[in-house]
Image (tube, rainbow, N blue to C red):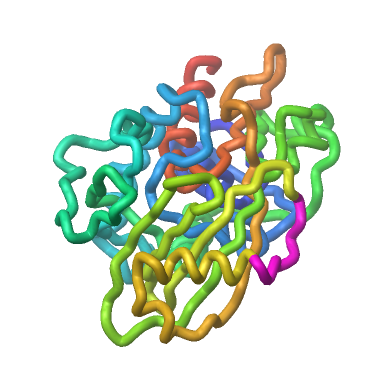
């Protein structure tokens, strides 16, 4: 059994800590911000590979995570994870980049009347969806029940930290830019709206037709999330009123019933963008980096955590 410190407690840090615990290790989490104050708490959190590379590794991590979430969806009231029919509008059928990450039998054609005039087709994907308002507390509870300890403080020196543990797992997201002097990291600004839950279920969908027309609607347990944006190199965490109006307008084009629902809250989060996810052991050090997941943190979380375990096992 190794004594391991995981730095960071977003969805990547918490998931990694849990997988390490349940492989037999003693794990402490050290974090600057508690889970409710991380970008993971803002995320729409549906399983969907988005803004993350390299593709082959992301596909493998995504598929592994798909099966982990499917298992969690058997207890939705406890975990906040459930399966949903996610309608994906497709403009260019030759570039369905997420298809290789899907298990067989998950995709089916949508009804022709649901396909807008300017689009080629649309698909239903039967995928896991995590209500982050329930799922993040579930992960925290699972970590603590496994005997985990959480320390709230900011880490400024990885090498000094590594002197006190058998392994350090760096899951600091955007924080790794300063911590690791990583100039490849950059913020991807996301803005979402939280709407009052309707009386009747509404369709879950995403439209990626053009970068400035990203729109999605995701019904959760107690509300609906509308998005969104994916603006690289924008670190503003303030609401942009014009963006709020545009998100609502784009989503209402696909789902007119949304017009009647009042906005409860507007949230902004900064995804950790990077040319490719960094998941590797630092040469000559007992440090493993696991950050830079872009818009796919939830989607690859369990797969990446399992690879961290594999790296440790290879070096024991």
Q: Hey, which residue is sitting farthest front in the picture?
A: 117
Q: Tell which of 114 and 240 is nearer to you.
A: 114
Q: Magenta region, mostly helix, strand or loop? A: loop
Q: Is residue 316 above or below residue 213?
A: above
- Does the rendering let one see residue 141? no
Q: Does 177 sit left or right of 253 as displayed?
A: right
| Residue drawn at 33 percent across, 34 percent down | 96
> Does residue 257 sit above or below 306 in this rendering?
below
Instruction: Based on the picture, tell me whether residue 314 belongs to the magenta stretch.
Output: no
What residue appears at the point 39 percent right and 67 percent down from the top-left corner?
253
Residue drawn at x 84%, y 34% as measured from the top left: 157
> How many numbered dots are placed on residues in this image?
0
Judge by depth and name the residue closer to the eye, 165 or 61: 61
Outermost residue, top side: 284
Percent x, y of residue 9: 62, 51
Coordinates of residue 129 in the picture (x, y in percent): 36, 57
In percent of width and height, residue 228 lies at 53, 58
Whether residue 301 is visible, yes or no, is yes
Where is residue 56 drawn, in percent x and y? 41, 22
Q: Which range of residues does the magenta coloring cover? A: 235-242
Residue at the spot x=66%, y=68% of the render?
A: 242
Above or below, 30 relative to 139: above
Q: Is residue 32 left or right of residue 218?
A: right
Which quadrant of the structure image shows residue 113?
A: bottom left
């Amino acid at each position: 059994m190794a004594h391991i410190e995981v730095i960071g407690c977003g969805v990547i840090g918490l998931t990694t800590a849990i997988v390490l615990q349940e492989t037999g290790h003693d794990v402490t989490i050290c974090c600057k911000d508690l889970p409710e104050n991380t970008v993971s708490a803002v995320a729409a959190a549906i399983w969907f590979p988005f803004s993350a590379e390299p593709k082959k590794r992301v596909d493998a991590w995504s598929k592994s995570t798909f099966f982990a979430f499917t298992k969690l969806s058997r207890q939705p009231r406890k975990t906040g994870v459930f399966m949903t029919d996610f309608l994906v509008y497709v403009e260019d059928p030759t570039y369905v980049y997420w298809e290789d990450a899907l298990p067989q039998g998950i995709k089916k054609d949508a009804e022709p009347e649901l396909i807008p005039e300017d689009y080629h087709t649309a698909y239903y994907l039967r995928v896991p969806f995590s209500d982050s308002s329930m799922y993040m507390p579930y992960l925290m509870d699972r970590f603590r029940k496994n005997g985990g300890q959480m320390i709230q403080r900011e880490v400024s020196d990885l090498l000094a930290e590594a002197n006190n543990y058998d392994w350090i797992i760096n899951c600091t997201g955007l924080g790794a830019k300063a911590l690791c002097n990583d100039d490849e990291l950059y913020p991807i600004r996301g803005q979402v709206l939280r709407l009052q839950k309707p009386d009747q279920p509404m369709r879950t969908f995403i439209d990626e037709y053009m970068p400035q027309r990203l729109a999605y609607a995701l019904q959760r347990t107690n509300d609906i999330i509308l998005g969104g944006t994916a603006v690289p190199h924008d670190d503003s965490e303030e609401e942009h009123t014009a963006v709020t109006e545009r998100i609502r307008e784009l989503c209402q084009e696909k789902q007119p019933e949304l017009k009647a629902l009042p906005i409860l809250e507007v949230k902004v989060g900064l995804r950790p963008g990077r040319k490719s996810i960094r998941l590797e052991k630092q040469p000559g050090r007992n440090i493993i980096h696991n950050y830079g997941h872009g818009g796919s943190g939830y989607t690859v979380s369990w797969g990446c955590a399992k690879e961290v375990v594999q790296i440790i096992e290879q070096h024991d």
